[in-house]
Image (cartoon, rainbow, N blue to C red):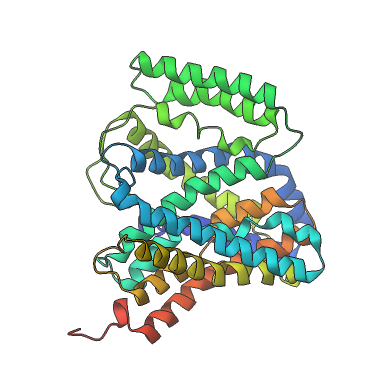
Amino acid sequence: MRRFVDNSGLLVAGTIAALVWANIDQASYERFSHALHFVINDIAMVFFFALATKEVVEAIAPGGALHSPRRALVPMIAAVGGMAGPAAIYTALALTTGVPELLRGWAIPCATDIAFSYLVARFVLGREHPAIPFLLLLAIADDALGLVILAAFYPTGAIRPLEFVVLLGVAVAIARWLRNGRIRSFWPYVAGAGLVSWVAFYRGGLHPALALVPILPFVPHAKRDPGLFIDAPHAHDPLNEFEHWWKRPVDVILFFFGLVNAGVPISATGEGTWVVLSAILLGKPIGIVLSTALCVARGLHKPAGVTWPDMIVVGIIAGIGFTVALFFATAAFPPGELLDETKMGALLSFSASVLAIAAAFVLRVGRFRPRGI
């Protein structure tokens, strides 16, 4: 059971339950979804994005995986390419559909689901493959850029910049005061500064799910972190205590996120579905491989032991958008046909795992590499 939960099984269970429910009794599902949408998407998901922020904070801290420019530059540029490629393809395809409203969803295929991508990479490439740390660094950078995109391009209402700046300034001042006071519990940061920050985002017209993003960097943390998904003794600094306390609740939150957001009638498949799916399945590998090739051409280096066939497979695996892509879809479109279509595209992005297995088999990489080579 623990392994099921650790491997995002609750999210998958919620997603499947939502799909079944929506296709059996769409009216009752929509009433349920509407009743919980704000609570889950605008309040509970604060802690999902907080855990993503925690990884970014530790990755860019001294000693972190993205602190050294020498190590971070290639995956960061690859992350940019892996977002620009899908966005460009999505925009081009949306313009050809004759449905200009689709353009608002350009960020949906930019997402990479860290957890699912990691699990698929370990299965396809093998646990110790050197491409896996590269994929994780790329995904962390992708998450950081995704947070910026969500804040900048998907407001939840009328933008009130003065109200946002003033309230966020108060929240940051509280967080800084707690840090300077050497407060070692994460709760005052969350319940004090975090609450004021949530009000700032909500009143300012930005997505309140990002409320803890500017607060987490002030929570005291260890100088070094073993890395995402690395088994290590539990650290007791406040930031790791935050992760340890919230990890299981966030798994439950993701169950409800899937249940509330993933209920799409199968008949809703349409142009938006294929635009999202084509953009993410083509744009991710193209963008990541081309941007990495540009880095190499400029004198930088791929990770040691990672071949170009490996890189192609990594690019395909990074096309699993799932959780974040689904969230972007709900942020981009109001309830209706376009939302249902693009949600289906986000859900079907999991098909990148099948394509990755096929590509690894054809290219003879990872588990499919001939023995002795």
The location of residue 34, given as percent across then percent down, is 74, 47
Query: Residue 52, relative to residue 245: is it above or below?
Result: below
The location of residue 127, given as percent across then percent down, is 27, 66
Residue lying furthest right: 98
Query: Residue 15, relative to residue 350: is it above or below?
Result: above
- Asked whether the viewer can see residue 18, the reply is yes
How many marks are shown on the rendered structure? 0
Depth check, front residue: 283 or 73: 73
The location of residue 340, given as percent across then percent down, is 73, 61
Depth check, front residue: 284 or 332: 284
Q: Is residue 224 left or right of residue 163?
A: left
Identity of the residue drawn at 35% across and 43% down = 59
Identity of the residue drawn at 68% across and 48% down = 331
Depth check, front residue: 62 or 232: 62
The location of residue 349, given as percent across then percent down, is 56, 67
Residue 341 found in image quarter: bottom right
